[in-house]
Amino acid sequence: MSNATAGNTRGATFPRSAPSRPYRVLYFPKTILEDNRLSTSFRSRCTVGSGAAFLGGLGLGVIHGSKTAALRFRAENSHRFPTTSTGWYLYHKSKNYNCMFSGINEGFKLGLRIPVWTALFFYIEEAIDDFRDTRDFASTVAASLTVSGVFSIKNQFNMPTAARTAGAGLKMGLLFGILQDAMALAKGRRVDYVDSLEKWWKYDATLRR
């Protein structure tokens, strides 16, 4: 390089390269997504799962709230049932309005609570995966039991109720975890405990020969 060229480039400023950011925030290569659960990013799983939990909680809350409001309205007015057709029309009209507003109110309350527990489950599952450096049903079961334990403590359940809650969490975690492992195997991703079982089976078959 000549002295003139060096002098021209000495005072020039060159753009800095953009700092590398985690792939979860900026970019999701195909090979990385294939290693994730359900072949999707953690953010996508958490967002979709929380959204589905909101819709499910909204529906269940509306159904439960409207039924409870109907029974309460009937109990509160059992001593003054209408005696005319106009009275029955106004009775049922008031009952329907009461059930509708109570159901919507209960639906939004339940719909906003369930996504919090769902997001907590996905965060714990991902944290356990990163700590163990592997992804299988064991992390899902551990996350489900953790969430059920925290839920029981928050609601101050007694021991029988807490045990039933933990049992339900164990069943759901086991079912969801094995389903994720089955989908991972179907897409060609290796699962550690399946590889271990294959090695043990081959070793046992070799010893029998």
Image (tube, helix red, strand yellow):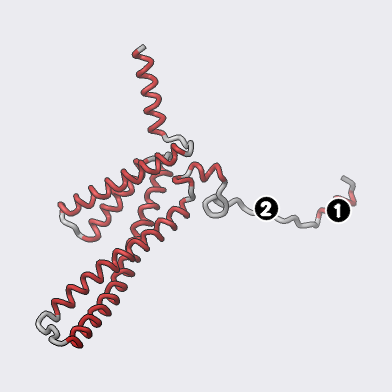
Viewer-closest of 194 and 63: 63
User: Is 100 displayed left or right of 127 in the figure?
Assistant: left
Q: Is disc 1 in contact with disc 2, using a CB cutoff of under 8 Å?
A: no
Q: Quadrant of residue 52?
A: bottom left
Question: Farthest front residue?
Answer: 85
**Which numbered tag is attached to residue 207?**
none
Residue 181 at what x, y percent from top left?
A: 40, 40
Residue at the image point whose x is 79% and y is 57% from the top: 12
Disc 2 residue type? Answer: Ser
Q: Nearer the viewer, residue 92 or 168?
A: 92
Q: How many marks?
A: 2
Disc 1 secondary structure class = helix
Q: Residues within 10 Å of mark 1 (few under 14, many from 20)?
A: few
Q: Position of residue 58 (x, y in %)?
A: 33, 66
What residue is disc 2 on? 17
Whole-percent x, y for residue 71 in the image = 17, 73
The residue at which mark 1 appears reads as: 7
Label 1 or label 2, whichever comes before in sequence order: 1
Secondary structure under tag 2 reads: loop
* 115 is higher (above) or lower (below) than 136: below
- The residue that appears at 35% across and 53% down in the rendered structure is 121
- The quadrant the N terminus occupies is top right
The correct choice, above or below, for 79 with respect to 44 in the image is: below
Residue 11, percent across and down? 80, 57
Q: Residue at x 45, y 35 (%)?
A: 190
Residue count near mark 2 (Cα–Cα under 10 Å), binned few <14, some 14–19, many ≥20: few
Residue at image position (34%, 41%) is 138
Q: Nearer the viewer, mark 1 or mark 2?
A: 2
